[in-house]
Image (cartoon, coloured by chain):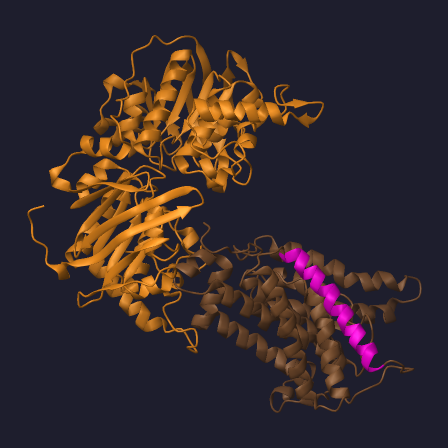
Chain colours: A orange, B brown
Amino acid sequence: MSETREPEDIVLRLRGITKRFGALLANDAIDLELRRGAILALLGENGAGKTTLMNILFGHYLADEGEVLIADPGGTLSPLRGGSPSAALEAGVGMVHQHFTLADNLSAFENILLGTQSLARPWLDRRSARHKLDQLMEGSGLSVDLDAAVGMLSVGERQRVEILKALYRGARILILDEPTAVLTPQEAERLFETLSRLVEQGLSIVFISHKLAEVMAVSQRVVVLRAGKVVADLATDETNAANLAETMVGRAIPKTVRTAMAPGEEILNLNKVCVAGAHGRLALSDASLILRQHEILGIAGVSGNGQVALSNLICGLQAPESGSVILHGQAIELGSPSGMVAAGIGRIPEDRLHDGVVGDMNVWENLALEDYLTPAFSRTGFMRRGAARAHARRSIEDFDVRCPGPEAATRLLSGGNVQKLILARVLTRGPNVILANQPSRGLDIGAVTEGHRRLLDARARGAGIVLISEDLDELLTLSDRVAVLHRGRMSPAMATEEVTIRQLGLMMAGHGTERTAHDAA
Amino acid sequence: MEIIEILLTVSFWAAATRIATPLIFGTLGELICERAGVLNLGIEGIMTAGAMAGWMAVYQGADLWTGVLFAFAVGMIFGLVHGIFTVPLGLSQHVTGLGLTLLATSLAYFTYRMILPDVPSPPRIEPFQPFAIPYLSAIPFIGPAFFKQTALTYLAFVSVVVVGLVLYKTPLGLALRAVGENPAAAEAQGIDVYVMRVGAVMVGSGFMAIGGAFVTMSAFNAFFFEMIAGRGWICIALVVFASWRPGKALLGALLFGAFDAFQVRLQQALGGDIPYQIFLMLPYVFSILALIVMSRRAAYPKALMVPYRKGER
């Protein structure tokens, strides 16, 4: 680098941070510098050690080696006491975790106030806190209903509460761990605007991500981690997305290409299906779709427009109020998850940790979860543990699930590896119909490409796939046809080649379908 | 019609309040523990220990208030035991709590027999006496029913207000609720989850012990075996009934007290043909019904019964 740095310009310096978890070297002698008023992107695949590094910085973990230096308001760097979140808070470090640390039953205001006033104080000073927060909200453009219980807020609002919480405590360095993983594109856009405003006001930000487009858009510098090591430290405008992707993964990324394929027989037919939603409303009304072999049918839509109901219906978690569901030309028993599995439906759920696996069970148990009653895995009422473990070992290898072995507890796996585990469970059964609900959400490029390849393989094999996604690029890459869900109504499916992103966007907002036009009339 | 007349007598409500007092203390104590995320099934034993300790202190010559303080301290010690097992060690709150009930009950009986090896009939102390609160006791009906009680009953009323204020109006209360809702969030804000939880369990257990002490030092004047008789378990249900709110806890305790006082009077009014056990059962039946009506939508403290382990998320 030719630029000369003023020493006082640096607000955070990590020197030689090393952290081991048992045999795993999560962070290997990491050096990193953050300058005042800059956004530093920390890029890396799942399991590369990004979150571990930031947890060390914030005091959740204690580093085995190395030190963290933080500048005081005057600009002098001094070492931070490790292993103590309160020390980090005091030094001006705020962290927004990927999984928010908010208490749902408390109001946003109480969540922000928590721990900011001495516990020995006889009463909470709400008025001055309120005043300070109002100013903060105005200055930063982060607006939230402070009196609402956090559990009632949307994900984007909760994130704003988290950021406000950090700012309220006077954070000068803000760590954002995968901030856009849970956001809709619009919310993400709004977040970026807020961040650039905050940076102008002198805040320094570490932005953890594995989404290249975001990193290119918001950061000034990029540090790339791979397998616990810093593999690149670059100015953002000296690199590009493709280059970063290769650096991050460590090899060239194969581009996902969908080859045209003649659709086969019709395998799934929903005809005017209505599914009940909350508060007596219909979550899905008169939805019809036809799925054929060798076909991926994409379902676009802003979340909350009936995707959950559609997914529940196909997974057998909810029975329809009316309408017919025909699988392979036969009406099937609905509302029974095991019946759906037996009928040859593969399910990749949206919330993979919650609905996809049982976290406290082993990898092999989770892999056998849909088949444990079949003769392959059980005999006379007893599990054939050997067979199930052998099956697990094969799956782990075939699907490259990175875990210590079949006995590992599933909750300790990273998101990408849990998804691989689910893919392994679903695809080794050779299902005819696959429901994939947000299969790439929160995953890194490597895992996403891998998942896409698996889905395309299944399609080539003859499966029909219903792909529900909010990511339009993903939908247009994978789908043969796309339909849009808006307020529980499904548009007719259109050939992917004949639609544009703009058109889909309009339909997602409720404009432009014949159907809604008809309804409005 | 007799039934309605019962409900309209002052003495009925005075009795209901008397019966409710130990329940108010016990429910508040349990509520404090559970708000911090720790279920305390040691309550039955802690109330027994408090009943014995407070009474014994007075019998040995201490004055009544010293006895109450001693009971509180004994409760805190048992709370410390429960807290250490369930919070930093993260053991099952159910198992630890039930074990603590057995331990505390047995220790109370054992100590009683150790100190008084051979007394023919239970010795007595001079208990708290009722006194009227000026002005308040002059209110028609309500005055004589609620404000001609003993000092411990008034302490129970005051405690409800104090616990309510602390929970909702102080930084301490906010921190306490937060460790019961989401300990990771509390820790990320620099609050020591272990200290908060153990502290809450200790204070809560102290309240339970005072509830026990009321029985031997105010309602009666002696200590018998089995005298707590399931009051602790009622408090566990009352906390759910109260949706973890102190004001509703008071209401629930009074309601249960009323049921209990009512069944006694009903026995007198209708006794004879119906076995008396049926009447004894009534308050519990009513409680279950009330629980069903009131608590179906109760919002549990989200981290209740979930041990918090640092660094694990």
The answer to whether residue A141 shows anywhere in this view is no
Is B120 situated above or below A291? Answer: below
**Is the C terminus of chain A in the top left, top right, bottom left or bottom right quadrant?**
top left
Q: Quadrant of residue B198?
A: bottom right
Counting from the top left corner in percent of width and height, residue A73 is at: 20, 67
Residue drawn at (17%, 45%) of the image: A221
Q: In this view, does B237 lie to the left or right of A311?
A: right
Counting from the top left corner in percent of width and height, residue B149 is at: 69, 84
Magenta stretch, overall SS:
helix
- Give whichever of B56, A272 is nearer the camera: B56
Counting from the top left corner in percent of width and height, residue A436 is at: 42, 26
Residue drawn at (27%, 31%) of the image: A250
Is B269 situated above or below B135? Answer: above
Is A389 situated above or below A90? Answer: above
Q: In which quarter of the image is residue A161?
A: bottom left
The answer to whether residue A279 shows anywhere in this view is yes
Judge whether residue A382 is colored magenta.
no
Counting from the top left corner in percent of width and height, residue A194 is at: 22, 51
- Give whichever of A409, B298 is nearer the camera: A409
Judge whether residue B108 is colored magenta.
yes
Residue drawn at (83%, 63%) of the image: B279
Q: Give the range drawn in magenta.
A: B93-116
Residue drawn at (83%, 68%) of the image: B266
